[in-house]
Image (cartoon, grey):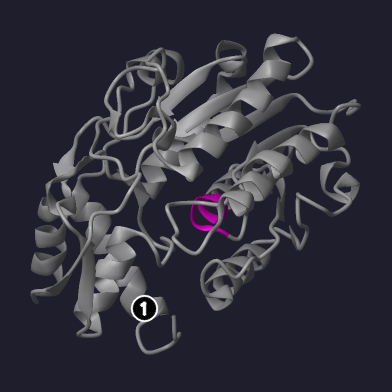
Amino acid sequence: MNILVTGAAGFIGSHLAERLAALGHTVRGLDCLTDFYAPALKELNVTALRDRGIPVLPLDLAVDDLQPAVQDVQVIYHAAAQPGLASTATFQTYVRNNITATYRLLEAIKDSATLQAFIYISTSSVYGAIATGDESTEPRPTSYYGVTKLAAEQLVLAQARDQRLPACSLRLFSVYGPRERPDKLYHRLIRCILEDRPLPLFEGSEHHRRSYTYVDDAVDGLVAVLARWERCTGEILNIGTDQAITTGEGIRIVEEIVGRRVQIARQPRRAGDQLQTQANIAKARQLLGYNPLTPPRVGLEKEVAWYRQHLLGRLDL
């Protein structure tokens, strides 16, 4: 199938594009390569994709002509977004890159004669501080990120409900692994230990419980949707591990892998942070046969190895 992956230069998007190509699909990527984090890291991902024959179009969903990207496309995975809880990103930035970008992508495909599936990559952040329920749980986001991702999700599902768009939404839970964004916990932790830097840690966050989901397990769920599309159209599905650990436990695992303790630099509590997530994936197990298996230590060993091989002493992030 001809597949477009938006946000293909990013962490999850790059892994997804590679997996789809390995499965025999014709894949093109789209990414505006913002400077939200080091462009050099995204360029590493773009190079890896191009080496596998996957072109990445440098387009901005919020302003550019998207017809070259969506022409003849049969499936779209919409992973592009303004992520996380960045203090440097304004509310207007989240609106632009999450809501406006999604709206313009939907407008670009509204007359498509080829599109068969639109898969929106959402987030557990739409649930808010506590994300432990199933997909029928009332969304109560506590951050600009969660609010705008939920709004974009509803733009997609509104068209699905109106029979204008074959679409579904997949809510991902705390994905980690090789290529993880530099602002996320494990990337920062590994960097701080290996480069002997103090780790900024928000007050109380070591007690937060998370469904830390290894990236390959997340991609398993994203790809499984294609094989069972008739079951998924119009649906919302949680994708993540149903096993949770505390942030403190995750830190100790990485310290054991590296063989060194990290210095902690305490920061004031971060507004909008999630306190507890544990993915309820009963629906994904039933509809997709979804079964994430990677334990935290195995996934974190792979991320540490990736950091040492590709970043340590090579890129200034």
Q: What's the residue at 68%, 48% (across, down)?
A: 96
Measured as percent of width and height from the top left, residue 94 is found at 59, 48
Q: Quadrant of residue 173?
A: top left
| Res 308 seen here | yes
Name the one closer to the observer, 81 or 211.
Answer: 81
Q: Residues within 10 Å of mark 1 (few under 14, many from 20)?
A: few
Q: What's the residue at 54%, 47% (across, down)?
A: 16
| Res 7 seen here | no
Measured as percent of width and height from the top left, residue 203 is found at 17, 57
Name the one closer to the observer, 89 or 258.
Answer: 89
Q: Quadrant of residue 99?
A: top right
Give the labeled residue for mark 1: 309
Q: Quadrant of the C terminus?
A: bottom left
Q: Which residues are magenta?
A: 10-15
Let me know if residue 218 is in the magenta part: no
Q: What's the residue at 30%, 29% (across, down)?
A: 131
Measured as percent of width and height from the top left, residue 198 is found at 20, 78
Q: Is residue 160 above or below residue 99?
A: above
Q: Secondary structure at mark 1?
A: helix
Let me know if residue 11 is in the magenta part: yes
Name the one closer to the observer, 52 or 305.
Answer: 305
Q: Is residue 70 left or right of residue 250?
A: right
